[in-house]
Image (tube, helix red, strand yellow):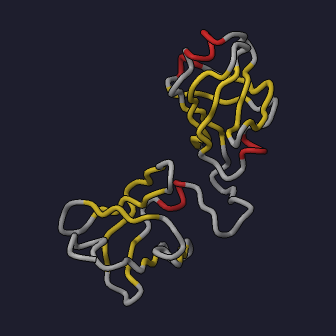
Amino acid sequence: MHVVVARIGRAHGIKGEVTVEVRTDEPEVRLAPGAELTTEPPEAGPLTVEAARVHSGRLLLRFAGVADRTAAESLRDTLLVAEVDPAELPEDPEEFYDHQLLGLDVVTTDGTALGRVSDIAHLPGQDLLIVARPEGGEAMIPFVAEIVPDIDLDAGRAVVDPPPGLLDGGEA
């Protein structure tokens, strides 16, 4: 199974380094030197991580064969994709891969059915569960512990405790 682990940002310096927006909870494994990653778009890769370092709180990567700023800048907005065994689970029990969340039934803490997880939006501040509502339309639910207190993969259910106004658009 293919999992997006990062998105390449701007070039950094003149020696081919790039900033990356990390989309994995295991960057030390998925983005380590020697890791070979496929890309979206496919013609940009595959890319092999040659070096990784943190600078001013941002992860910088250098790829084999990308030796200057021009080559690095041409990779901007490329998605880095790792091959992951579908049965593999993240080490932290509070972390989930997207494919584990897709299709979960979403219910409130009192058992009211809200719909099914149809997508996960990865935003800079937090992730959002995109929930297809049975009556049509979608709800966007911040994927944070205060609002999504329980994910039960065995039962195929996500329990949410939405604050007032999140689902109905009313006053909070």
Identity of the residue drawn at 73% across and 23% down: 62
Q: In the displayed structure, would residue 152 be above or below residue 100?
A: below
Q: Check the image and name the residue furthest to the left.
A: 135
Residue, x 71% and y 65% (percent of image)?
Answer: 92
Q: Is residue 119 above or below residue 143?
A: above
> Taking the image as drawn, is residue 55 in sight?
yes
Q: Position of residue 44 (x, y in %)?
A: 56, 18
The quarter in which the C terminus is drawn is: bottom left
Residue placed most toward the observer, 118 or 15: 15
Does any portion of residue 2 appear in the rendered image?
Answer: no
**Can you give x and y, in whole percent of width and height, for residue 113 in the image?**
32, 79
Q: Viewed as shown, does residue 172 lie left or right of 94?
A: left
Image height check: is 13 above or below 146?
A: above
Q: Residue furthest bottom?
A: 110
Image-quadrant location for residue 130: bottom left
State the image coordinates of residue 16 (x, y, percent, origin top left): 70, 16
Left or right: 156 in relation to 10: left
Residue at the location (78% across, 45% down)? 28
| Count of numbered circles in the view | 0
Q: Quadrant of residue 67?
A: top right
**Vertical order, 161 against 133 (above or below):** below
Is residue 52 left or right of 12 when viewed as pictured? Answer: right
Q: Is residue 125 left or right of residue 6?
A: left
Q: Quadrant of the N terminus?
A: top right
What residue do we see at 69% from left, 59% from top? Answer: 90
Q: Position of residue 108 (x, y in %)?
A: 38, 82
